C-alpha cells in the first residue's frame, strides 16, 4: 500500500514537472519579428543619448538612461572608453546623414570604442523599470563598406530570437529593430556587428525608439533633414528681334490722248478719246524674330589640390592633415554654401579635425577664397579610400575630392 502511494506520488510529481515545463515553453512562445524601419516599430517612446553628455563625452561601461516617457535602464558595454558623438555638430559632417535611413543631423550617438580601446561591442540595453514590446535604432559600422549587424531580444535569460540586417554596399547607416507581437516580454536587447570591412567592434547607434504598451503616443516631431538649396543667379533671357519692312512703292502711269477733228460745211464731228491707266503696287514685308536660349551660367568654385594621397600612416598615431583651398572664380557673383558645407566618407579614418576645420562661412564673395582641412588617421590596416563632397550653388556643384591612404 505504501509502495503504491509512493509510486502514485512520483507519477504526480512527474506530471507536475511536465506541466510546468510545458507552461514555461508556452510562456516563451512569443511571436518576435525583425523590423527594418522606424514606421514598422510603431514606436511611442525613445532613448535620447544627449542625456549622457555633450559631444565627445567618454562613457563608462554601464551608463544609465531614462527614456522620454520615464522608462529607466542601463547600457552594458565590454569596457569604458566609448563616446557620445553628435552628428554634424558644426557645418561639416562626417556621418552618413539621411532623414529616411541615415543618422539625423544634431542627434547624439553612442559610438563604441575601437579595438585600440579594448573593443567595446556588443552593446546591450537593459530595461529595468518595465518590459517593452519593441526596440530599434539606426546603426552604422566604422568600416567604409557593406556590413551586417544583428539585434537579439531577451526575456530575462531566455533569447527570443536574433535577427540580422545588411547595409548597402557603401556601408551606410541602416535601421535595425525587433518587435514582440505577442506581449511586452522584452527585458533587454543586444546590438552587435557580425561581419564588416575593417573594425567590427567599432560602431555607432542613434536614438533608440521603443514600443511600450500602454504608453501615450507622443506627437511626432519632424526630423530635420539637411536640405541644400542651390539657387544660382541666371542672366536675363535675351530675345533679339530683327524686323525688316520695305516701303510700299506705288507706281501709277496714266496716259490720255484726245483727238477732235472738226469739218465745217457739213456738220460732222468726230471725237476719239483713248485713256490708258496703269497702276502698279508692290508691298514687301519681311519679319524675322530669332530667340536665343542662353546657356545657364553661374560662378565656378575651384578647389586645389583636386585630390590627396596621404601615403602610409601608422594606426593610433598623430593624424596627417591636408588643407584644400576653395576659390570663387567669378568676378561678380557670390557662392552660397549648403548646410552641411561638406561630408566625408569612411569616417573616422578620414575626418574633419575638431578645431580649425574650415575658414569658410555661409557665402564666398566674388574672387574670394577659404580653406577646408581634412585629416587621415587610419583605423585599420591596408589601403583606404574616401570622398569629400562640398555642397554649394556654384555652376559646377557639387564638387568632390577623392582621398586615399594606407593604414599600417
Image (spheres, helix red, strand yellow):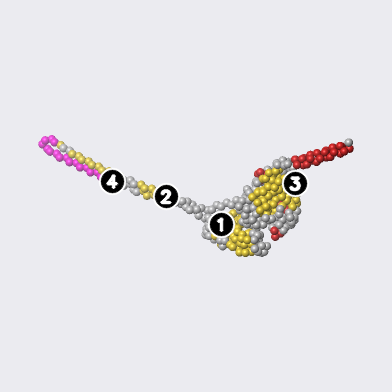
Residue that mark 4 sits on: 251
Q: Which residues are magenta?
A: 251-268
> Residues at badges 2 and 4 in contact (C-beta under 8 Å)?
no
- When asked about the image quadrant of residue 334, the answer is bottom right
Measured in 3D between alpha carbons, the distance from the residue under mark 2 to the one under mark 3, in whole angstroms, is 80 Å
Residue labelled with disc 1? 399
Q: How would you rate the neighbour count of disc 4 (Cα within 10 Å): few for under 14, some for 14-19, many for 20 or more?
A: few
- Disc 4, SS: strand
Sequence-earlier tag: 2 or 1:
2
Instruction: Indicate whether residue 211 is drawn in magenta.
Output: no
Nearer the observer, disc 2 or disc 4?
A: 2
Observer-nearest of 381 and 23: 23
Q: Mark 4 or mark 1: which comes first in sequence? A: 4
Using the image, tell me which numbered label, if any, was put on residue 158.
Answer: 3
As for residue 252 lying within the magenta part, the answer is yes
Q: Cα distance, mark 4 to mark 3?
A: 112 Å
Residue drawn at (50%, 54%) of the image: 297
Mark 4 or 3, nearer chain start:
3
Look at discs 2 and 3 and give the one toward the viewer.
3
Amino acid at each position: 500500500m505504501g509502495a503504491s502511494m509512493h509510486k502514485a506520488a512520483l507519477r504526480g510529481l512527474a506530471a507536475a514537472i511536465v506541466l510546468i515545463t510545458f507552461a514555461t515553453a508556452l510562456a516563451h512562445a512569443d511571436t518576435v519579428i525583425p523590423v527594418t524601419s522606424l514606421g514598422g516599430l510603431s514606436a511611442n517612446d525613445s532613448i535620447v543619448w544627449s542625456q549622457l553628455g555633450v559631444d565627445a563625452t567618454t562613457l563608462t561601461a554601464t551608463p544609465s538612461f531614462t527614456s522620454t516617457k520615464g522608462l529607466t535602464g542601463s547600457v552594458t558595454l565590454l569596457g569604458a572608453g566609448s563616446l557620445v558623438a553628435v552628428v554634424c555638430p558644426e557645418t561639416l559632417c562626417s556621418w552618413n546623414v539621411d532623414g529616411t535611413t541615415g543618422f539625423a543631423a544634431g542627434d547624439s550617438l553612442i559610438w563604441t570604442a575601437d579595438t585600440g580601446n579594448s573593443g567595446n561591442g556588443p552593446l546591450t540595453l537593459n530595461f529595468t523599470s518595465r518590459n517593452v514590446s519593441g526596440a530599434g535604432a539606426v546603426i552604422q559600422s566604422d568600416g567604409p563598406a557593406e556590413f551586417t549587424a544583428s539585434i537579439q531580444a531577451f526575456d530575462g535569460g531566455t533569447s527570443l530570437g536574433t535577427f540580422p540586417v545588411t547595409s548597402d554596399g557603401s556601408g551606410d547607416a541602416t535601421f535595425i529593430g525587433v518587435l514582440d507581437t505577442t506581449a511586452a516580454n522584452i527585458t533587454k536587447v543586444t546590438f552587435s556587428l557580425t561581419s564588416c570591412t575593417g573594425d567590427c567592434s567599432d560602431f555607432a547607434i542613434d536614438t533608440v525608439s521603443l514600443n511600450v504598451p500602454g504608453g501615450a503616443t507622443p506627437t511626432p516631431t519632424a526630423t530635420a533633414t539637411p536640405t541644400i538649396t542651390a539657387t544660382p543667379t541666371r542672366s536675363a533671357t535675351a530675345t533679339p528681334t530683327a524686323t525688316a519692312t520695305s516701303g510700299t512703292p506705288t507706281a501709277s502711269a496714266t496716259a490720255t490722248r484726245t483727238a477732235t477733228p472738226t469739218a465745217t460745211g457739213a456738220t460732222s464731228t468726230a471725237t476719239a478719246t483713248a485713256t490708258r491707266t496703269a497702276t502698279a503696287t508692290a508691298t514687301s514685308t519681311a519679319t524675322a524674330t530669332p530667340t536665343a536660349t542662353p546657356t545657364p551660367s553661374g560662378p565656378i568654385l575651384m578647389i586645389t589640390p583636386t585630390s590627396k594621397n596621404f601615403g602610409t600612416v601608422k594606426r593610433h598615431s598623430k593624424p596627417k592633415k591636408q588643407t584644400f583651398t576653395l576659390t570663387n572664380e567669378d568676378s561678380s557673383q557670390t557662392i552660397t554654401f549648403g548646410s552641411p558645407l561638406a561630408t566625408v566618407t569612411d569616417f573616422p579614418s578620414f575626418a574633419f579635425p575638431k578645431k580649425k576645420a574650415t575658414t569658410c562661412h555661409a557665402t564666398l564673395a566674388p574672387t574670394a577664397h577659404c580653406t577646408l582641412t581634412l585629416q587621415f588617421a587610419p583605423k585599420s590596416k591596408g589601403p583606404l579610400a574616401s570622398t569629400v563632397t562640398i555642397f554649394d550653388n556654384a555652376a559646377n556643384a557639387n564638387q568632390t575630392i577623392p582621398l586615399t591612404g594606407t593604414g599600417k
